[in-house]
Amino acid sequence: MIKANNLSYVGESGRNTSLFRMTKHLIVLVCIAMAMFSCDDTNEPNKPVPTDAYIGTQRQITLGAEMKGFTGIDFECVIKAEDGTVFRRSGSHIRINGKSILTFDTGLKSGVYRLLALEVPVVGAESDTTWIDYGLGCRVRISAEAQTAIVLDSYDPEMNLVGEGSEDDPYIISSAEHLWRLRDYTNNDDNNKKLTKDTHFRMEADIRMKDICTSSDRHYGWLPIGAIPENPFRGVFDGQNYKIQGLWIDRPHSPGVGLFGFIDQATIKNVIVSNPDITGNYAVGAIVGATTSPGDIRGCSSLHGCVVDRGSVTAPEGSAGVGGLVGVVDCTGFLSVDSCYNAGTRVSGDYAVGGIVGAGSLYSMTQVLACENKGSVEARYTGAGGIVGSVDSLMIIGCKNNATINGGTGAMSGNMDKGGYGTGGIAGGTGVSFIYSSQNTGNITGAVGVGGIIGSTRVGNDDSNYEGELLYNNSLVKNCGNTGNISGRTSVGGICGEAQFGAYAVYNKGAITAAENQCTLGGIVGNTSITVLHNVINQGTVTSTSAESAAGVVGKTTWGALYGCQNYGNVAVTSKYAGGIAGWVGNNTVANYCLNTGLVNNNGTRATGGIIGEAGDARVWTGMDIAGCVIGAAECVMVFAGPILSVTGNAVTQNVVKHAEAFKKFFNVLHVGEATLDWAMVAYDAVTYSMSLYDIFTEEDLKEINVNLNTKATAIDNDVKATIKSIQDSYVFDATKLPQGINGAAITGYFDNFNKAMDFYQASDDNNSIINYNLNRTREERVGELEHRQEIKEIVQKSIAGTCIIVGSVASIVSTFATAGTMTAVTAGVMASILTFVGGANAIVECATNFEVNAIVVNQCTNLGTIKTTTSDYVGGILGYTQQNCKLTDCLNVGNLDGNINKAHAGGITGEADYRSVIMRNVSVGTNWFNPIAAHAESTVDYSDNFYYSGGTYAVLPYYNNATSVTLEQLHDKTFFEKVLNLSGSIPLWQITDKSGFFPIPYHSEMETPIQ
């Protein structure tokens, strides 16, 4: 409590009455009487005469109960005119019979004014004067002609604020002392129960907090509104874009630190916190420490149109949940943040640190719309993100990060005992996540799981070191882009570091670097168990000196559906596997109509390819081998409809016990996933709110949110499209590398065809469904060719819904998983026995666990880039090493080989074709290959109808040449190819232009075939 001149500035319960009050009143009366006879009040010495536009003759205003706590005499009254102008009047105060008479030195003219606060001078120990305010907030109507001043607003003596707390007549916050009163009321056990989600508060002025923070506690600063979880703030607080300046808190051992500590069913909107200086331990944010949820109730809170500007929000060693605006979303809580902005506030802590939101607890849901971060973020260990640090279920649309993000700074070398996972430009770590129409321009540096948009969805692993079998949640990224440089130890990607990952229409222009021994990295995604990539493009360089798997698009994936992937960046690595599109792909991958134009320069020793380094794995797969394919996460629901989840009998308990040993070694959990069945999808062109958001937003709020979201998301969408086009347009093919007689103009036709294929894909939801269906049908047919088992066909057919990206108005990967209530993800064995799905990705698990062969199809892919290596064992223009049973068809290689290597395994299409693989209907016009098609193939390989043109630039060794050499004239002759290549029909796969020097190029994508 601070007292000065018998004036106390605490809540009503702590206000003092003085034995000297009556004496002072009498003295004031005498002084007023003397002044009336001694001088002209308009020429009082030593007081400046106001020169504002509101000078008039009315000098007195009488107030009642709202002034009962004020005991000062001299004051300055802060006043706001109807036009918003804030000005001051000095004067004196006397209180008689429950009434306070304010007498201004200079009067007011007629009009309506809001009295914001009285400021009282207090002389300190060193004779310095400070001003302490006493909040008012009421409006008065001045009539100079009638010499009246009528108070227009009611006063609530219990709340000790002007107003009634309704939407039409909210409680008025017009001074720092009003925030003190609100804090005292909220933190009181009895009063807190009276606050509801419909209690309204509204700011009416900028507020300076520095002195009142000191008054709150000279050492620790401001005690938050809602200081403990049991007494959270509830209601609607509208800052009306007024500034709260100089907020400081130094509570390094406390949870729930911010202007508001804990909130529940609260809406905080249009609040600007300028230059905060905040330190806490857990749940730390400039505006809100944490959202809470009582019991099993889904607590819903929101921030709308809030800003933090400059200053810092920090936390010491051992801290968690630190955000620029919000620290933590509590367990089972739902938080919606929209149109908010971190305008340069620095944020740092140990775990879960974000520019907007720090952490989302288990089962929580976080939605962030149209937000932007410009404040640097640092997490010493796990979870650093420009928008969110580490959360559970997440939806982000229309967000940007323009700041540097540093994660895992305490784990950049040595062991990972304290973590170091998940650093992302938009999100560091998440559970199931959907990120649409968002961009990152900041440089991102982390340890493990580092991405331009999302870092990691890792749950944990099953070994005592971080290199064990990995477990991931699902993440879908659509219409997003990155231009920042991305670097880390391993699992580094331009868009995503590591996840079960889907992406559509995303680009990366930043440089990608990974430094760990045996690391994985890619221009789009570094390491993924399941990946579905459609129409993604990379222009950034990919570099590493000690990688396991590296590529222009995806470093490594177990299960992939790659369609229309493009790489224009150079890959310069020392890696076991390296490729223009993918370094290594597992035994359930389809790649169609992918393109590489970049240089692939690999000093590694295993496999290098223009499209894929190595495809397939000869081993027999088990449940634990593909544990990364089965992570539990949230259900996607559009208009409250979605796949059906059924858990039957006591299988849950039995199987969790059975597999308990598999859970014991999980550690450093970035996210623990469980089915959150009430998650609702929100898309920018069809916003569907659930979780009682209509209860916390007004109709006007929803309209404003939708307008803001449409504006920002549409602008980003358009920029993404323009950037993708500019990357394509900026590419210039080097025709000097072509064999003699070949015309480089043929490449122009290829790009026209490529863009038409992407246009078909985007034209409608029906076309999109056709592409997804055919990608999965292609895999199904390959499995059928290999296994001839009806059960496999049925399993794969069910997986069609599980490996797709829908491009329509609402996008989702339809996949529902659960963890049976455990604190960890469930492995394949548990999943297969306890869950039944209608649609969904559980069928993926069945696929991967049931068949023991590769079902990889690579078709209609094109390489225009040079392959440079002097050390790789297997080198191919399309695929370096084609494992057993893989199918490689209708591909085109125009790239040449640069390097003095053992060419025995250097082929224009593939370096090695293992048994029962298919190499068919491919065309190569690249140069300097040992063999223009397959350098070496097992006797069981189906090797037919392949064509090449060498132009005499290199000798084709005769002992293995199962391909047809064509002349320059035959190369553009349709009649020569028409019996072999698909040149006609409803979906022709190849196109030949009858011009000298032209050659066959891919035409329509086979995935455009109508569904039968």
Image (tube, grey):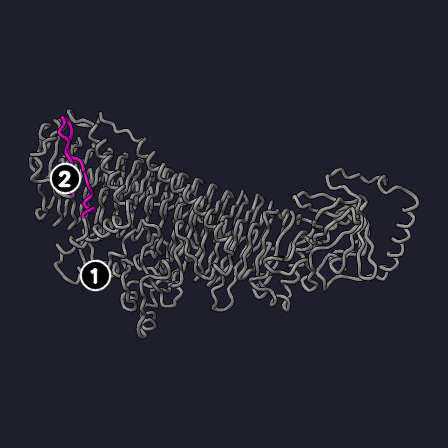
Residue 994 colored magenta?
yes
- In which quadrant is the N terminus drawn? bottom right
Task: Label 2: state its secondary structure.
Answer: loop
What element does badge 1 sit on? helix
Is residue 668 shown to the viewer in this render?
no
Marks 2 & 1, CB-CB < 8 Å contact: no
Q: Disc 1 marks which amino acid? A: Ile
User: Local crowd at mark 1 within 10 Å, few (<14), some, or many (≥20)?
Assistant: some
Q: Which residue is mark 1?
A: 795
Q: Is residue 611 left or right of residue 65?
A: left
Residue at horizontal 19 percent and vertical 28 percent from the top: 738
Amino acid type for the residue under numbered disc 2: Asn
Q: CA distance from mark 2 to mark 1?
A: 31 Å
Which mark is drawn over residue 922? 2
In this orientation, does residue 610 appear?
yes
Residue 223, x across and y down, in percent? 64, 57
Task: State the predominant SS element of the stretch in magenta.
Answer: loop
- Is 725 drawn above or below residue 827 in the view shown? above
The residue carrying pointer 2 sits among few (fewer than 14), some (14 to 19) or many (20 or more) residues within 10 Å by Cα, namely many
Picture residue at 62% right of the left edge, 62% below the top = 186
The percent coordinates of residue 120 (x first, y second) are 77, 50
Task: Look at the image and say whether residue 209 sits in the magenta stretch.
Answer: no
**Quadrant in which residue 841 is drawn:** bottom left
Magenta segment, which residues? 987-1009
Of residues 100 and 632, the one nearer the viewer is 100
